Amino acid sequence: MNTTAHFRLISTGSIVASLLFASAIGLGKPQRNPKVSNQENPGILLTTAMKNMERGVWSVSGTVTLEKTIKLHGLLSGEDYDLTMEPRGMRGVVIKDKAWVCSDRETWHAGSPNDRLPYDWVHTPIMAGGVLKVPFEKVGAEQRNGQTWLHIRLKVPEKKIKLKELPQYWIVVDSQGHAQYVGQVETPVISQAANSVLYCSFDYAPAKEKIAPPPLGPPVDDKAYGFYDIEQHKADWRGKIVRIEVTPKILGCEQIGEDTYRAFFKDTATPNHYGIVEFPRDALVKLGFLRKTVSGRHALEDLEKMDVLGRTEGEPVSLYVNVIPIGEKPAARTVAIGARFVRDPDGNVNYTWESDEKQSAKLTPVPAPSDAFDGDLVNRGIQKAQNGNLDGAIADFDRAMQLNPKDDAPYYNRAQARRLKNDTAGSIADYTRAIELGSTNPVASNNRGNARAANNDRDGAISDYTRAIELKPDYARAYYNRAVARKGKGDASGSAADFKRARQLDPTLVSEESVANSHSSGGSANNGAAGTTVSLLDGKLKLDIPPDFSRDPDDSKEPKTIAKFSGPDGAWGTVLRGTHGLTPDKLEGYLKMRVSEYNKGFKWLPKDSHLQWLKKDIVTIDGHKWADWGFVPVMKGRKDYSHNPVYTRNLTTSYKGQLLEINFTSNLNTDPKLKKEIDQVMDSVHLEE
């Protein structure tokens, strides 16, 4: 669904939007204390009808008119929808955090649950809120299919206003005069983006059917195919899903529709065999083939000159495509529907544009001269690091230093990469060189402080955090880190002051407990001292976070992630809620499914290694059942994993019918002490219903 249209609905309800419009044409003030009963007050009836529509499934059909008229029809249920726009026939389905789009009336592909423009059009007119603040008047009543429909509209004193331009509602009422739902609405709604007015006209009715995912089946098998295979089996694979694997570099692209692009690739299944894949709107950017979408038709050389080319090397990329034969020709359309195949615990099939590869590094780019070749190398190195190729990234940073020894950017980014490779001394040296070259980036000082803290150089760390604060006085993370370091030195008052300031700047970073605890307890992560007690879910969930972990700011783009934590050398943790439904009786099945998924192996596992399961049990914690599962990669023939990376622990439970999951991993950090810290986090988990 296209959210880049020329107009956008404001986020408030239709009544507020209509009021803004009405005020421009001279509406009088709302009447005060109308002396009528609830059943006779049109505003109260309208509010009741709208609130009734917040539950259940509702059919909708009608039009939105600006310069052109767009027809919409489909289903609404809370924030979920299944809507089709005509005459293009574009259909979108959103169920919780999953989305699907069909733009050709035939093939489906993964969408984004944030694409809500058609939903806003049909939902805004029936949003409850603000109705009682404006006067409505009764126009009349009529019978439709044995039902009574009460016609009301906004009441205005002016006589010259066109009545059809005022918000009008037809409310279905029962025999007692009680409002049931809004059956019809005709109303103007302001579009702030277009600085104009939309005219909406919709009919609503209770629906018997439910909003369901589109009929996407699983892939034919797990094998990766090529374009030649599709040509040979196009009849057998008609309408089916097949996984193909292509080289990481796109060879050309062409826009063939408002929301559709063709891309030219070489596959990996057959030597020197090429083919075309169709993609929706921004999928090529999401998958890293392009930096941004471009209109027109462009060969590889054009994309390079336009500086929009994405990845050019690395691992092959898997895509799931829908096969659509083209007549009698020995070819077929391959329409990409996603990059990852997911089967929910309830058996539903879904495809997403998220790849299976997890980012191994998160580097913060430092600005470099845009016209310098060493700057290109720095950017390329950052891209390699984000794709997990740390050695390749370091090689690019080395080359950039040779070209411009006085540029601090390659030193800063090489320091980031070295930290992820557990080269603490090397990272400290690079951070130091970047600072000596004049870097005023407060992150460089903060990160050198983290590296020094990892080496138990608390005085050096405190000095670096102080410098970072001088460069950026509102740097909450630096205050937090200095608080942890001061706490480790036994400076309770200094620690408390820094915790308090960090909390003032970013309340999500530190809890009140850490401020209180800093007065009475010292120690550090190295001696097992307690860190911060984090309270989530309105205090129902609590867990103790080690001092060398910090809570990341909340991201509105990840509403299912209720907390995220960053630890030393890339270690991290998350608390997820509501990614899908989960009841206690399905917990064991969920555990078996996840164990089965992980047993299939991963590309990032070193050769001659396997996942050793630490736990995969159903346990009871404070009377609540949890799935306790964890693993660590182990080389064949070895039993000791104390210095292995990717030590991972997970706790999963059902909370109010939804999945609640806590994940912590050491990532590339191999320190045995960190494994104990992760275990302590899991042992501290406490949940109340």
Image: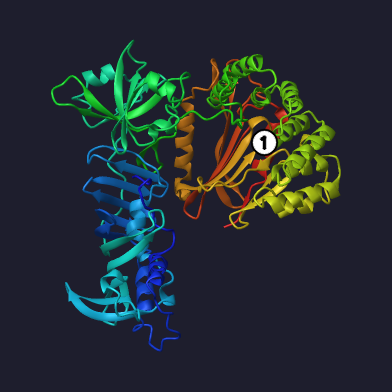
Relative height, residue 145 to residue 433 (above, below): below
Residue 381 vertical position relative to residue 528 in the rendered view, above or below: above
What is the total number of numbered labels drawn onto the structure image? 1
* Relative height, residue 176 to residue 451 (above, below): below
Query: Based on the displayed image, in which of its 4 quarters is residue 377 positioned?
Result: top right
Q: Residue at x 23, y 45 (%)?
A: 88
Compare residues 394 and 670 and report the one nearer the observer: 394
| Residue 28 locus on image (x, y percent) | 41, 79
Q: How crowded is mark 1: few (under 14 residues within 10 Å), some or many (20 or more)?
A: many
Classify 90 as above or below 504: above
Query: Which residue lies at the image location 23% right of the left edge and 32% below the top edge?
Result: 239
Quadrant of image for the N terminus: top left
Amino acid of disc 1: Gly
Front-lying residue, 44 or 2: 2
Q: Can residue 528 be seen in this view?
A: no
Q: Which residue lies furthest to the top in this view?
A: 271
Q: Residue furthest bottom?
A: 35
**Quarter of the figure with the C terminus:** bottom right
Q: What element carries label 1?
A: loop
Looking at the picture, tell me which residue is in the foreground, 474 or 476.
474
Q: Position of residue 401 (x, y in %)?
A: 66, 17
| Side of 265 relative to 548 (left or right) | left
**Residue topped by disc 1:** 567
Where's residue 116, x and y in %? Answer: 38, 51
Query: Residue 650 occupies which quadrant of the picture?
Result: top right
From the viewer's perspective, tell me whether residue 346 is left or right of residue 466. Answer: left
Residue 675, by quadrant, is top right
Q: Which residue appears at 71% of the width and 36% of the height?
A: 442
Q: In this view, does 350 lie to the left or right of 367?
A: left
Please provide percent x and percent y for residue 284.
39, 31
Q: Is residue 578 visible?
A: yes
